Image (cartoon, rainbow, N blue to C red):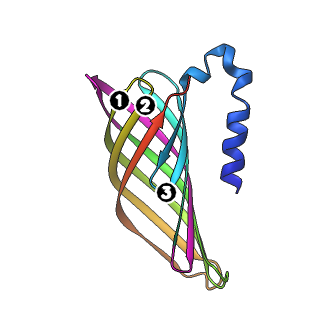
Amino acid sequence: MRPLAILLLFLCAAPAAAEDGFLSKLSLGVNYTGAQARYDLSRRTALEARYQSGESGDVTAGVFGARLYRFPRETGRYRVFFGGELAALSGNTKDRHYGTSGFAAGAFLGVETRPVKRMAIGLDAGPYFIALKERKTRLSSSGLDFVVNTYAQLYLF
């Protein structure tokens, strides 16, 4: 619930910053199992907040993260990018008997295209270090994994 509140606060502050061109640099998107808000710091750099959640069997999980994008070049309708992400992770069983929390940190390389002026569709992938700790037993686990992300981004203003 906290990530949603942060995103709403971010969006409510937008009209106050409209005179600075804030809204023209803001875009909202959907990704596999979640949503994101991206702000273009410059033509080649963007910062993004994203939230993802999922459920499998009696386990629910959530991820709230921040990404930094760098767009080194644009060729036609395609933009290649790279960046890094840092995210907070949590998971619980429905009966709350077990719960985990932790973090993920990773780097990614991707490409996005604009099929229409105000929409981008993208794909990125890269290695992530993931560390989790079970709250009750304090057992921990960490490892390297390969993560793939897909998204559709809408430029509203």
Separation (CA) of disc 1 from disc 2: 6 Å
Marker count (numbered): 3
In the image shown, does 56 or 19 lie closer to the viewer? 56
Write down the residue under mark 1.
114
The residue drawn where x is 57% and y is 62% is: 62
Amino acid type for the residue under numbered disc 1? Arg
Question: Is the magenta region chiefly helix, strand or loop?
Answer: strand
The residue drawn where x is 67% and y is 83% is: 95
1 and 2 marks in contact (CB < 8 Å): yes
Percent of width and height locating residue 143: 40, 69
Is the N terminus in the top left, top right, bottom left or bottom right quadrant?
A: bottom right
Amino acid type for the residue under numbered disc 2? Met
Up-down: is 120 above or below 86? Answer: above
Write down the residue under mark 2.
119
Magenta segment range?
56-81
Separation (CA) of disc 2 from disc 3: 19 Å
